[in-house]
Amino acid sequence: MAARSIRGAIRGAGAAALAGALALTAAACSNPGEGGQGGAKDSAVVGIAYEPETLSPLLGYGKDGNSKIFDGLLTLDADMALRPALAVALPEVSADRLTYTYRLRKGVTFSDGKPFTAKDVVFTYTTILDPKTNNPSKGELDAIKDVRAEGDATVVFTLKYPYAPFAQRTVLPIVPEHIAGRQDVNTGAFATAPVGTGPYKLLKWSRSEKIAFEANPSYWGGAPKVKKFTMAVIKDDDVRATRLRSGDLDGAILPPALAQGFAKDKHKKTWTAKTYDYRNVTLPTGNKVTGDTAVRRALDLAVDRQAMVDKILDGAGKPAYGPVPTGSPWFARGTERPHDPAAARKILDEAGWKPGPDGIREKDGVRAAFPLWYLSGDKLRQDHALAYASDAKKAGIAVTTRSGTWEVIEPKMKDEAVLAGGGSPADPDFDQYTLLKSSLAGDGFNNMAWYTDPAVDKALDEARRSGDTAVRKAAYDTIQRELVKDPGYTFLTHIDHLYVVSDRWDGLSTQTEPHDHGLASGPWWNVETWAPKK
């Protein structure tokens, strides 16, 4: 979520705005020979929408794996199954599920030539858990009681409680103690000049422009055949499509309407990745309008989710009723909400929200109106926001859409609604805990709606601390049903990710993706295994 953006000017712009946008495109282009369709056969340049705040795993980078510069103890394959990475096998788990033992791969070196050992694993996890470390995701490792090395090739984790998805947490990248341990964890140079064991080394990071990688020739998994890989940071959807069309990019993530423009290009292929990525509207609890349960329930019924899927996503997605997709085994059947504007109006009538002269409702002198912010340059968020505002107006609620960068939006999140996103395919805990836990309200982009529900808090803790699948399933059912009673967010759609890529490599595939896409996901999730077509 914490990405930065600028607003695009090409689509629907006048002549002056169009000229300015094209100038922006030209200025943002890569230098000749750095990649793109006219570049070297062993180089690739792809366009992504966001860039990370840091490249240090100690501060949160790559926490869900697949970080290119680094490896975790485990990794996820194309089917999202856990596979060994720096560990030689999946962990040995004790009968009480409180001890996880990892045997490490021998002979692995960091890209500076220094050996990787168990001490680096211990250093990584203990540093993240240190209260002084500014890692916003450290709560995800709350279950860890202790981590210790037994020699150079064995690491043992002891847990406080039988945290069911713990092994999935160990895709977290491992950093070298001999470098990162000699710096201030929060301000040191490691955040922008990292060293890892991964298939690529950082060549250059030009903020808001590109992140360039070069193949690590000593990679334990074999040197990649794509020798140079560049992620061009292009925050505007239209500019990304223009650069792909001009040949400046080999691939890009695009919204459906723009991806469709490449359907007849025989030199490019569109890849569709199934995801857990959702779009929702935060309804801040402290706001007199969005914090009213009747307004929240009415909006939940007023919104036409299927129309959004059909018209905005061109069918590349599905309606969302919560963070869990309807196709997931964790989804609570019966929590689907119909599109029922009449029922929405009845809820508001009964709660005392009466239509004013202009059709917008009022109650106790408060007008049923609020702003809705979306990230500028993001066409999907813009289109979702406009559709939401249109549906809300039919129920007598005035929603004013506004665009801005995260620098503008973040200070307003406590009191004003945001067209937000999230989603993780790994485990329900990974998403729902940070989204809904009341104690995390105001903690950066966690619980952006300041949602508070004691029954939800209790269920979140039960699900997190139980190793029993049935207990966890019941807890997540409770959470989803509580969200029907008092929806602190209006969930809109789950979105398939579309990527358009030049058809000049073998080995491309996709995974089931989280919300945080483009950087570590997309058809380039396994770029280290690509091979140029002959």
Image (cartoon, rainbow, N blue to C red):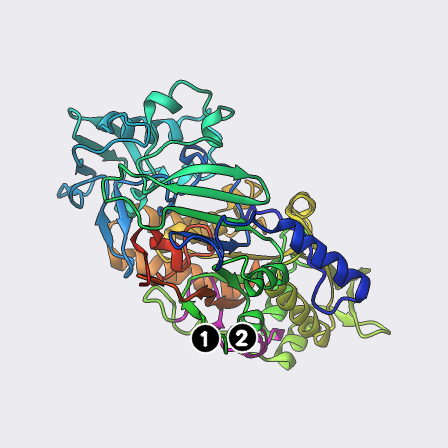
Query: Which percent across, then down, holds residue 502?
Result: 44, 65
On screen, residue 105 versus residue 216, left or right, reads: left
The residue closer to the viewer here, 13 or 24, is 24
Kindly state the secondary structure of the residue where label 1 is placed: loop
Query: Which percent across, then down, holds residue 6?
Result: 67, 51
- The nearer-to-camera label among 2 and 1 is 1
Residue 288 seen by the camera:
no
On screen, residue 299 versus residue 317, left or right, reads: right
Say what amino acid the circle numbered 1 marks: Lys
Q: Is residue 240 magenta?
A: no
Say what amino acid the circle numbered 2 marks: Gln
Kindly state the secondary structure of the residue where label 2 is placed: helix
The residue closer to the viewer here, 327 or 103, is 103
Query: Which percent across, then down, holds residue 359?
Result: 80, 75
The residue closer to the viewer here, 369 or 200, is 200
Dividing the picture into quarters, in which one does residue 532 lie?
A: bottom left
Whether residue 208 is situated above or below residue 419 in the rendered picture: above
Query: Which percent across, then down, holds residue 488?
Result: 57, 58
Q: Which residue is mark 1?
A: 266
On screen, residue 175 versus residue 89, left or right, reads: right
Badge 1: how crowded within 10 Å, few (<14), some, or many (20+)? few
On screen, residue 14 versus residue 376, left or right, reads: right
Earlier residue among tags 2 and 1: 2
Dividing the picture into quarters, in which one does residue 98 lie?
A: top left
Whether residue 160 is situated above or below residue 37 in the rendered picture: above
Residue 406 seen by the camera:
yes
Q: Which residue is mark 2?
A: 260
- Residue stretch rendered in magenta on the structure: 302-326
Q: Residue at x 60, y 51 (%)?
A: 29
